[in-house]
Each structure stands twice: as structure tokens, then as C-alpha cells.
Image (spheres, coloured by chain):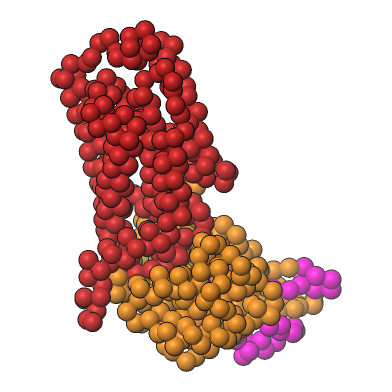
Amino acid sequence: MNIVEMDHAVRFFGATPAVTDMCLAVPKGSVFGLLGENGSGKTTSIKMMMGALIPQEGTVRVFGVDPLTLKPEQRARIAYIADDMGLPNWMKLSEGMALHRSYFQQWDQGVADERLERYGLRLNQSFGTLSKGQKRQFLLTLALAQQPDLLILDEPASGLDVSVRRDFLDSLMELANTREVSVLLSSHILTDVERVVDHVSFMKKGACVRQANLEDMKEGIKRLCFSENQDRDVLLQSFSILQEKQVQGGYQVVVEDFAAERMDGLDCHVEHLNLEELFLVFNALSDVGAVR
Amino acid sequence: MSQDTYYSYQNQLLRELNWIWQLHKVDTLLGLVYVYLSFFMFNYVGYSKVYDVVLPFILCSTSIAYLTYIITNPQVRGNTQPYYFGLPRDRKLVWDGLVAYLMLAMVAMVLVTVAGGIYKVGSRGITPYYRFHPEVFCLPLVCMVLVLFIIQGKRSLTRSIQFLVLVTLFGLALWQWWDFSFRDFAGKHNDFIPVHELAWSTQLGIALIVLFCCLGALWKLRTSWIAQEWGELR
């Protein structure tokens, strides 16, 4: 079952295309990474999921219904954190928490207290006196205490230093493991994403170019390094090639349908790709649109 | 408490109003202070006291236009987003909350203006000023439009209520200069009474035009809200 679905969603701002053809399916219980360059349409897609933006074409479904028609009790099951979010600087954490809490019947104060203690935050502090990392930790505290079924994070770790970022992501992992929470995460920091996600979607120019289980993707997409002696036609018949590059003494190809048994007779060695390399491969693709 | 009761319309509306108050109480109080101070800002010796009555009314409009803008466009300040769509709110209720807020603000505005006017010119003296100066009905609307235009600017300075009050005062000074220079009323020469009092029908006509303009604007706002063209975050 998918907790979020987008089917050929389109959104323009005036004449400027933000999302041109977005298809997405976030499986329940997954930690889903939404990846793409700046301006690829990640935030616009997320805002359409939240019902803050309305798709001009296509459909968006959250919990199986149009997010614009979500009732408050359904909306209470979604938590959202973005990098530019916060409270007014003059507001005390206690005031911010009280405001937030009033909207959630299933609010768990125990979770909030435990998180505050863990992060060393005091309720009589003003939001403006917190560091950037502490602000993010407080927002995460609010999000977790509302007991969400879906946690949407738009660039949650940008601007944070390594240790804070790691702690933040560890909290996410802990959440995903201990509760049946689906997490949708968009980020530029691919090394972080790779540690936590199990599904990924690559966006380019407002469309999803590829979506898959990360492990399956890594199994299927490999870089093959050949010498110049290797017959290129044989290679082309054997694999579907995503990227090809000349290197000294040979060439490298990235294939998307790798299988060890099809390597017989080929003189090459196989390299595994990490998420960053996968991202670069898909980002270099010229054709945009097909979701696989 | 059952889920239906907890998320009932009334409870959610109360949360909306509480949310508006908690988030904007500083600006609201600041706006009211400016309005209060405006009663003491000018003392036109030798000129009609109509300006003493009108001025707070205009500043009220400025404050309300400003608050309305930042409440209906929370992303303007960049730090209120969590309360806009991270919370279990629905569009219709947000709309109703805004209308409730506007109605409350209008009542407050009228009360402050009338109380201030009575303080300045006495309860008997307040009526003629509005009769002689029907344009005061239009000025707040003009003022609100200007404020909404100015506040669209990218610089944080132009989004501050202090800047808007300053611009409003400048506009008022221009208006008074035009009044004193080119209009033949409310001066020493006519004992501060305009030569021509407008007919009741004319005054009523002006009031009705203003009223229908307001109703039209509200209707347009509601239809665009229902058509989901408004209330988006970008």
C-alpha cells in the first residue's frame, strides 16, 4: 500500500514550470528519499502533497485521498519540517509547544519531554536564542510528539554541522524502526540520505526520472570498465546503457540491467555505485519523464 | 473527548483565533499603540478638527491591512509556515477564522475611532465631521490598497508596521495640504464650517458605493478561495 501517490502532477508558476510530470509512490513504512538538483521541483512536489499547492494537472493522493480534502484528524497524522521553518524569535518554546499541542489530540507529552531533555532544550528559552541545529531539534520534537504516520522532511539537515546532522538522522532512523512511520525526505546531502533511505526517487526538471528500492537499484545499476579491445557492439547487445565515458586505455559504461551471468565472455571489471554516483548518472540523462 | 468533538468546527475555530492572536499579538498591540498615539500626534490650531478624527481611522486601516496581509500570507515572514500547513487545519476553517478575525478587527477599529473622536471633539461634535467629509469613508479603503501594494516589496523595511505608519502619515500630510490649498472649507475664513454641506442622498450614495465595493471584494475573495486560487504557499 502506498501512503503518498502522485500521478502525472503538473504545476506552473505563471509561465515557469516547477513540476512538469511528477509520478511518485511512497510505500507505507518506508524511508523515502526525494532527490534532485536545486529547482528540480522537490519542494513544489512536497507542497502539493501537503495541500499547500494545488496541481494544475494530474492527481495527488495522501492516505488515499486528495490532500486538499483531508480532515483535521487525518491531517494530524502528517508531520512536516522544512529548512526555512521556525517560530517567531520572541516566542518561548513553551508557548510554541502549547500552540502546537492544542491542534493534536494524540499529542504525547512524554515523547516531547524526553526529546527536550535529550537535546538539552529548556522550555523557558526563546526560539531566537537557539542555534540552527537546536531549532531543527525543537521542530523535530514537535513533529514526533504529534505521533505522525507520515513524516515529511524538506531539506531537514541543510546548514547543520556533521554531528548535529548525524544525530538528527539517527533520530529519524530510530523513529522509522520503532514506529510504523513512513518518512519522505528530500535532501542535497546524499551521503546522509544513503544512510537512512530504503527507497529513492530522482527528480530532474520537474519530473521523476527514476524511482526504485535503493538496494534493488544498486544491484541493477553498475559501472563496467572495459579495455579498448572489448567489442562495443557485443556490449550494446548485452546491456541497456545509461552512460558511456571514454577513459584512458578503455571506456566505462553504466548499465541499468546488470546481471552477473551476462558477464560471460566480457573482459571487464564491475564497480558498485553509491547514491551520489547514481544521482549524477540520472542527472546526466537527457530524456526526462519515464518513471520506472 | 471523542475525535469528532476534539476536531469539531467550534474547537478548531477557537484554535484558529487563538493561533492568530498568539502569533500576531505583538503587532496587534503595536498597531493599537500607534492608533492611540495618533490621537495626540496632531493639533491643528486654526484648522478643522476633522483631521484629528480621521487620522486614527486611517492608521487603524493601516494596522489592519498590515496584520491581514501577514496573517493571510504567513510565508511573508518566513517563520510561520509550520503553523500554516504543518498543523491539522482545513482551508474552509482558515477562511472562516480570517473572516472572524476581520469582523473583530472592524469592530475594534470602529470603537477606537468613535471613542477617540468623542474624546477629541465631544459626542455632539463628531457627526458633522463625517457629514462634511464623506471621503473619510473611502480613505481607509484607499489606504488599505496602498498598504497591500507597498508590503509586496522584498525588503524587510517595507514590511514593517513602522514603515507603513510613516508612509501613511506622509500620505495624510499630502491630503491635508491638498485640502487646505484647494478646497474651500474648514478654515478660519468660514469658521471651520464648510460652505456646502452635502445632501443626505449624496452622502448615502457614497456610503452605499463603499459598502457594495466591500461586499464585492468579500464575494470575490470567497469565490477565489472556493476555486482554490487563493491561500497557496509558494
Say above or below: A151 vs B46.
below
Identify which residue is drawn at 44% across, 35% down: B40
Q: Which chain is orange?
A: A
Coordinates of residue A97 in the picture (x, y in percent)? 45, 74
Furthest residue toward top: B189
Is residue A38 shown left or right of residue B54?
right
Say above or below: B90 vs B3.
above
Is residue B214 shown left or right of residue B149?
left
Dividing the picture into quarters, in which one does residue A182 lie?
bottom left
Identify which residue is drawn at 22% across, 66% down: B10
**Residue A256 falls within the magenta-colored stretch:** yes
Dividing the picture into quarters, in which one does residue A238 lie?
bottom right
Say above or below: B201 vs B42.
above
Q: Which chain is red?
A: B
Asked whether A199 or A252 is in front, the reply is A199
Q: Quadrant of the N terminus of chain B?
A: bottom left
Q: Is residue A162 visible to us here?
A: yes
Coordinates of residue A148 in the picture (x, y in percent)? 40, 80
**Residue A197 falls within the magenta-colored stretch:** no
Q: Which residues are magenta?
A: A246-272
